[in-house]
């Protein structure tokens, strides 16, 4: 193929992603791929783009050193991808990449800076600003806010549906604005007086006559307020959440970067090999249950039945969420209970060798502070079990799972109760489960709260993010179990294992089906 055509193909490809490339730089890549087929060129350029994005080039100009990095990695990229394309992996919260939105290039980049548990004060404002920018760019792409660039379809009907966002600085520089739509963080600087904050300032708001759309509104969440501004106060007529965005649309602004976490340099969502395996592996399943009280004999008995019952068709993983003690006890007691659980697992033949046992701690489990993300259980507590069973995995809370191309978030927290306790207005209509699901998905975070309500490690806020929306969000909450699906994302609450007559959730990835399952007691078994 003509060298000039290949050079033009390369420069256009990177230009579409916001990068510039000089001719002499492009020729280095031309020499590499000029003998490739069209399909192989596309594959190579996709991998090259991921490499460039991971280099975090500030001025968007690709130089010779950047291309040399691509060429160094390309020699063994096929073997590396095979090794890193894991079928199942658990990604702990502290390993989830941090990213930020770059307004100039309209894309996300993975941040490489070192993060700390005890972060400096600047990190607090930075994570809030990052949440704001992530939601803002999503809103500005939405049909209701995106400008209409096609003059041929500009009609009064179309224009009437468009909104223009105002910022705090716009309002602060005016005395009266009749029509205002503003995105901001809901805050309360003074008792009984709410504000909307954005990076340009804070505006007092009057919610006395506001209509609240579906959701649970809390301080620390981002709201869209519609109303009028007069005498320094925004009188709100309607308060709602930022609109949802399908994950397919969101991922386009990450390129092939692996924002999810795990060993792969590129996002496994795009792996054809894993997608084929996922679709054909009909028998694969994941089991989720919460409140796994190991000091309760009834719970231990049901876990024994669970393990033995699935021994003939072992699932990919069984995710056990805490708290692992019903009554608060010492670490030594918990260690002895995990040793007993290990003995139960020993009774199986197949499951103990083929199923990962993932342990997700509750806030109440030893020995960690009441801050998210919560570190895994200490190995000393589970060491007896881990010595005998190599497939026991100590996870953080929350954690992420990757099964083939599917992305799953697991969080053990009584989130519904916390949202209901802190909402500024309890919903009058609709089911609570719908309000809960909409709140988490629209806020794109597991913790739409102020730090006083739910303390978090600021530098690791990305581990609490739900953007782009994953395939499945599993919440271990004590309330009644439920599941809801919006924009191809399913959120499921497992409920409490012992309080729900030993019910658990069985997820089949090939069909994305969630089944409500239950372990019967001995009386029911005898009757049947």
Image (cartoon, rainbow, N blue to C red):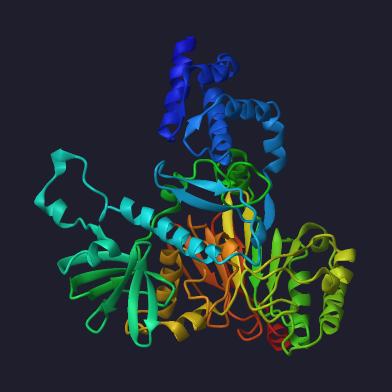
Q: Is residue 141 above or below residue 342?
A: above
| Residue 194 visible in the shown view | yes
Residue lying furthest top: 2
Q: Nearer the viewer, residue 3 or 267?
A: 3
User: In the image, is 430 to the left or to the right of 419?
Assistant: left
Q: Nearer the viewer, residue 163 or 220?
A: 220
Q: Residue at x 58, y 74 (%)?
A: 494
Q: Is residue 29 above or below residue 85?
A: above
Percent coordinates x, y for residue 510 in the rendering: 58, 53
Which part of the image, by quadrant, shows the C terminus? bottom right
Q: Residue at x 53, y 37 (%)?
A: 57
- Asked where in the image residue 226 lies, by quadrant, the reply is bottom left
User: In the image, is 512 to the left or to the right of 264?
Assistant: left
Percent coordinates x, y for residue 344 in the rendering: 84, 74
| Residue 347 visible in the shown view | no
Q: Residue at x 41, y 69 (%)?
A: 438
């Amino acid at each position: 193929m003509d060298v000039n055509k290949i050079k033009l193909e390369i420069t256009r490809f990177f230009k579409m992603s916001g990068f510039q490339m000089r001719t002499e730089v492009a020729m280095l890549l031309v020499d590499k791929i000029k003998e490739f087929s069209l399909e192989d060129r596309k594959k190579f350029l996709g991998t090259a783009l991921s490499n460039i994005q991971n280099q975090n080039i500030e001025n968007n100009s690709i130089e010779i050193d950047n291309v040399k990095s691509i060429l160094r990695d390309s020699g063994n990229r096929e073997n590396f991808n095979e090794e890193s394309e894991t079928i199942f992996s658990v990604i702990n919260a502290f390993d989830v990449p941090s990213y930020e939105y770059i307004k100039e290039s309209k894309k996300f980049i993975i941040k490489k800076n070192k993060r700390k548990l005890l972060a400096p004060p600047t990190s607090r404002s930075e994570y809030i600003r990052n949440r704001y920018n992530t939601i803002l760019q999503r809103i500005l792409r939405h049909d209701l806010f995106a400008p209409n660039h096609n003059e041929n379809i500009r009609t009064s009907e179309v224009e009437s549906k468009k909104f223009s966002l105002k910022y705090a600085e716009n309002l602060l520089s005016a005395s009266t604005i009749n029509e205002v739509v503003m995105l901001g963080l809901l805050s309360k600087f003074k008792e009984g007086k709410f504000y909307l904050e954005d990076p340009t300032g804070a505006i007092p708001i009057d919610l006395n006559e506001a209509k609240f759309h579906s959701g649970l509104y809390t301080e620390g969440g981002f709201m869209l307020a519609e109303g009028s501004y007069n005498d320094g106060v925004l009188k709100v007529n309607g308060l709602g959440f930022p609109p949802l965005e399908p994950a397919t649309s969101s991922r386009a602004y990450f390129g092939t970067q692996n924002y999810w976490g795990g060993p792969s340099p590129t996002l496994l969502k795009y792996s054809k090999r894993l997608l084929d395996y996922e679709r054909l592996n009909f028998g694969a399943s994941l089991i989720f249950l919460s409140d796994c009280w190991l000091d309760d004999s009834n719970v231990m008995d049901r876990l024994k039945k669970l393990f033995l019952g699935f021994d003939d068709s072992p699932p990919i993983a069984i995710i056990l969420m805490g708290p692992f003690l019903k009554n608060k006890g010492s670490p030594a007691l918990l260690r002895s209970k995990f040793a007993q659980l290990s003995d139960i697992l020993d009774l199986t033949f197949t499951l103990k060798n083929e199923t990962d046992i993932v342990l997700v701690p509750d806030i109440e489990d030893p020995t960690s502070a009441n801050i998210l993300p919560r570190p895994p259980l200490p190995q000393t507590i589970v060491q007896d079990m881990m010595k005998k069973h190599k497939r026991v995995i100590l996870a953080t809370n929350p954690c992420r799972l990757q099964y083939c191309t599917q992305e799953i978030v697991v969080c053990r927290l009584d989130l519904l109760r916390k949202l209901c306790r802190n909402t500024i207005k309890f919903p009058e209509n609709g089911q609570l489960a719908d309000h809960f699901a909409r709140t988490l998905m629209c806020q794109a975070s597991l913790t739409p709260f102020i730090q006083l309500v739910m303390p978090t490690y600021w530098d690791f806020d990305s581990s609490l993010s739900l953007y782009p929306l994953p395939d499945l969000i599993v919440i271990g909450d004590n309330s009644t179990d439920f599941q809801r699906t919006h924009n191809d994302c399913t959120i499921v609450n497992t409920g409490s294992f012992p309080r729900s007559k030993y019910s658990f959730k069985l997820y089949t990835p090939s069909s994305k089906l969630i089944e409500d399952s239950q372990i019967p007691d001995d009386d029911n078994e005898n009757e049947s």
